[in-house]
Amino acid sequence: MTVPRKSAPWALLIGLAAVLLLAISGCAGDRAPSGARELAPSDAAVSAPAPMSPPKERLQRDIVTTGSLNIAVADVGVAVDRLVGLTTGFGGRVDDRTERTTSGHGRTAELTLRIPSPKVDEFLDDAKQLGDVSSIALKHDDVTGQRVDLDARVAALQASVDRLTALMKSASTTADLLQAETELTSRQADLDSLRAQRTQLGDQISYATLTVSLASEFESTSPGFVASVRHGWHALLSFTQGLIAVAGFLLPWLPVIAVIAGVFVVLRRRTRRRQ
């Protein structure tokens, strides 16, 4: 079958239209990815800043505070009373108290005080007003690791005790019951010991331990003229009191001494007469 010649122009037009349509579609396809890339989720995610993670909670530090304070005061007894009142006023307590009087150093006192840790500095500022501070020392020990370790061991032992208690309740034989009871007794003793250590550590953390020493104020080692006269007068009085004491001691013996002396005199006279 032969195609008539008059249809050739129409076929040529249809072919050109198809080629033009394909060219337009290709240009649109080349431009589309560039616009799509601008809105692509992956690129947007890269350009956007990463969200910040919430800050981790800082571990609370546990500090044990110990210290000593030496003060020279005018009156040790009055200073002790004021110090005890100051301690109770700050919510603390007196764990130990010793007072003594010595010939060479006068009266002294030593107190072991427990002061709430947050109030130590304020307490020391007030305690310094009692007299002349000769020395002061403070020490701070971080026991956070020790506290965390004790808490973990207590929790582990408590869980073990709970499991053993459950085993005892479900024991089917006497042997199993006795074995669980023996193990439970041992674990419970360890748990009680750890709890006691944890309680003591908590008390040391909550209350600082301060040792305060009080001593009487002394005069200068080289006394002046007035002090020398005073000391000489006291020495004279002491010597006079000593003589009076000796006389008082010998007074009851005077009659006996007089009798002995009289007998001696009589015998001596008789001897002379015989001669």
Image (cartoon, grey):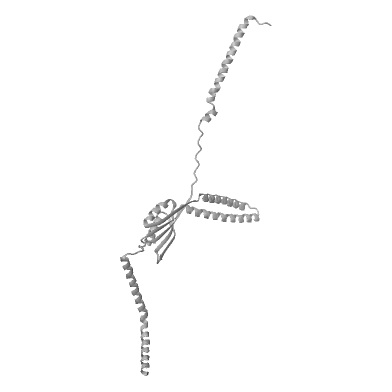
Q: Residue furthest bottom?
A: 274
Q: Is residue 19 left or right of residue 69?
A: right
- Looking at the image, is 48 positioned above or below residue 232? above
Residue 27 visible in the snapshot = yes
Which of the two residues, 234 or 93, is positioned nearer the viewer here? 234
Please state which of residues 88 and 98 is positioned toward the viewer in this rendering: 98
**Looking at the figure, which quarter contains the C terminus?**
bottom left
Q: Is residue 272 above or below residue 170?
A: below
For this orientation, the residue located farthest to the right is 1
For the N terminus, the image quarter is top right
| Total labels drawn | 0
Q: How far across and down, in percent of the image, does residue 40 sit? A: 54, 26
- Report if residue 84 is visible in the image: no
Please report the residue visible at 50 percent of the width from the left and 55 percent of the height from the top.
200
Residue 143 placement (x, y as % from top left): 50, 51
User: Is 198 on the left-hand or right-hand side of 274?
Assistant: right
Q: Nearer the viewer, residue 180 or 138?
A: 138
Q: Position of residue 55 (x, y in %)?
A: 49, 40
Q: Quadrant of residue 211?
A: bottom left
Direction from residue 6 to residue 141 in the image, left or right: left
Q: Residue at x 57, y 55 (%)?
A: 190
**Who's the residue at 41% across and 52% down the image?**
121
Q: Position of residue 84 (x, y in %)?
A: 40, 58
